[in-house]
Amino acid sequence: MTLNYYLDKPKAEGETAIYLFLRTGKQTIKLNTGQYINPKCWNPKPDRNGNHVNRKYSGFSSFNEWLDGLKKNVHELYNRLTQDNAVSFEELKEAVLGILQKKEVQVTATFADLFRTYIDINTSERSKGTLTKYRVLLNHLENFSNEKNYKLTFESINMQFFDLFRTYLIKEKKHTDNTLWKDFATLKSFMNWALARDLHQNLTFKKFKAPQKGADIIYLTEAELMRLYQADLSHKPKLERVRDVFCFGCFTGQRYSDIANLKKSNIKGDKWHLRTVKTDESHQVPLNAFALAILNKYKDAIRPIPVLSNQKTNDYLKELGKLVGIDEPTSLTKRRGNEKLTNTQPKYEFISTHTARRTFITLSLEKGMRPEVVMRISGHSNYATFKKYIKISEKVTETEMNQIWQMPVDSKS
């Protein structure tokens, strides 16, 4: 016996009936399951997980479970009926109809289903990194639900949930305070999205508050940047290319994803015209002499700048930093609940592609560039987001204090 599902009208514009085809020998039973679906939400051939209903349907998980359950029930019925004696075609048909009449048809979207729909809807509007954060949070939510036997519904997102989930993330997932803040900000965003669509009326989530601490910012001093930029790496061509890409970021202030997308057609004179990957906004970046020199170095290459993957670049940057002596003992401090976590290592261990952007912002401010001008170049749209990148060095703080608060010269002396 074989069982398969087919749509009544696979090319229909709206919903159409789902039929169950049961074949035994040369005979086929065609039964209306009582379920309807838009063909756009249907996989004619099951996907690798055996699912017919795809993610375009908000309750795809529950719907697939229902269809799988029906198949299982029919298989069990067939095995039971044919265990001792042969069963007639009509007897089998009547028995299957009996299952369909008894089986409750309640296909509703679960909390997780709707979270997946939220992710899918945002696919064209959010960066890959943001979508990855959404999926990681959903994974944590589902694991929490299974491990703690806590059923997730819109109504169960209450203060008890907040306390339990927060404790779970801190103790079992080892999340720091800043990661917690991002997790709950994402969850609140999803809850607001669902609230706007009348999927629930629960406002308790608006009370969720997770602490956000200012993160330590790693950037290169001007001396460190120039040491790296001027280092002779001709004997290490791969590191030389990584150095040039990193320094290009330090001299332009742009995200690594945008540097990776740079095309020669984007460069017009001393301007870089781009559409940012993260925000999908048009942006124009003035290119200073250092940035133009790096581009000129690769003018005969196919690509304007030799970009590697983010991960490989991060690995090579640590090697580079060590090679040129960017090794001052540096401490990063994070908090996890009431626990203070301090990690002290040579500075090169903390260098990543994002350090370039932070270096540009910090050094530009130290050199006296107005914050609004730096924001314009870096592409930050609001100061609240921008200020977390600012890390004024102790030397600059001391210098400016002495410049502003000089003792007046005694004219009598």
Image (cartoon, helix red, strand yellow):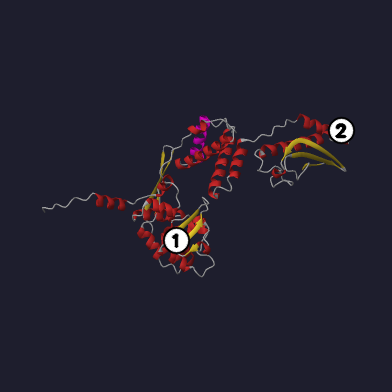
Q: Are marks 1 and 2 in contact (CB under 8 Å)?
A: no
The secondary structure that dominates the magenta segment is helix
Residue displayed at 23% across by 49% down = 405
- Residue 394, percent from left and from top: 31, 51
Residue 224, compared with residue 234, is above or below; it is: above
Which image quadrant: the C terminus? Answer: bottom left
Q: Specify the farthest residue to the bottom.
A: 300
Q: Is residue 233 visible?
A: yes
- Residue 192, label in figure: none
Residue 277, compared with residue 67, is above or below; it is: below
Q: Which stretch is magenta?
A: 158-173
Q: Amino acid at mark 1?
A: Phe
Residue matched to label 1: 248
Looking at the rendering, which quadrant does residue 351 occupy?
bottom left
- Residue 47, percent from left and from top: 70, 47
Looking at the rendering, which quadrant does residue 22 occupy?
top right
Residue matched to label 2: 91
- Residue 215, percent from left and from top: 41, 45
Q: Nearer the viewer, residue 54 or 166?
A: 54
